[in-house]
Image (cartoon, helix red, strand yellow):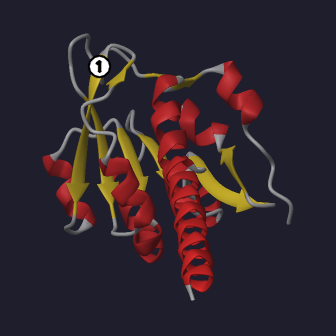
Amino acid sequence: MAYRLKTVKWIFIACLTVLSMSLYAYARGEPSEDQVKAAFVFNFAKFVDWPDVALKSGDTLNLCVTGKDKTTEALKQLSQREVQGHLLHIINIIDEPDALADYECHVLFIGISEKRRQQQWLAKVQNQAVLTIADNLDFIKEGGMISLYTEAQRVQFVVNQSVTQGTGLKLSARMLQLARVPRE
């Protein structure tokens, strides 16, 4: 009987060890797809120059977020980080696209939950120095600047340079080199 109790004890300890190791690996594991997309958006802001009239030295860099999904939630975690000497401020816009007039957005991220209204959001910042980003490939076709998409389990992005040119935004050559052309 003592032998069985000892065996059960060691099996129990082994199970706890395996469980704790897997929880540790999970905690230290790879970021989720949504966290990767949020990191992309954050890094895009590092590789864009805004005209002086749109973003002055010492101003906060306002990242306006629309929609409610996992990526928009991940973006909210980036608040108060520094980007090109500017403090990043996340503004969650839960109203209609007309609400954009109340905010000075430098970056506009349109969440996937707002895909059906993305043209309305784009219309509100058309020809302004606002970097527009969304989480779907249709965004580029509708006049957006950067579309995030997943291909072969990797987050990729595509840039619509013709839209950015008329706004005064300057995208770095390095960022443009990393942009992909999605497979149809």
- Tag 1, which secondary structure? strand
Q: Which of 22 and 95 is in front in this view?
A: 22
Residue type at tag 1: His
Q: Residue furthest bottom?
A: 1
Query: Residue 24 vs residue 176: left or right?
Result: left
Q: Residues within 10 Å of mark 1 (few under 14, many from 20)?
A: some
Percent across and percent down for residue 88 are 28, 31
Which quarter of the rendered picture does the N terminus lie within? bottom right
Nearer-the-camera pick, 103 or 4: 4
* Above or below: residue 43 compared with residue 113: above
Query: Which residue of the protein is positioned furthest toward the right in this rendering?
Result: 183
Mark 1 — residue?
Answer: 86
| 67, 9: nearer the viewer | 9
Residue in view at x 38 percent, y 40 percent: 107
**Where in the figure is residue 98, as x and y percent of width and height?**
21, 62
Q: Which residue lies furthest to the top in this view?
A: 57
Residue 178 in percent (x, y) is at 74, 33
Q: In which quarter of the image is residue 47?
A: top right
Answer with left or right where residue 84 lies relative to residue 180: left
Q: Residue at x 66, y 58 (%)?
A: 149
Task: Please determine whether, in this image, residue 41 is positioned above or below residue 123.
Answer: above
**Figure check: 80 above or below 67:** above
Q: Give the residue displayed 56% in from the left and 45% down from the top.
A: 145
Query: Is 169 positioned to the left or the right of 21 in the image?
Result: left
Q: In which quarter of the image is the C terminus?
A: bottom right
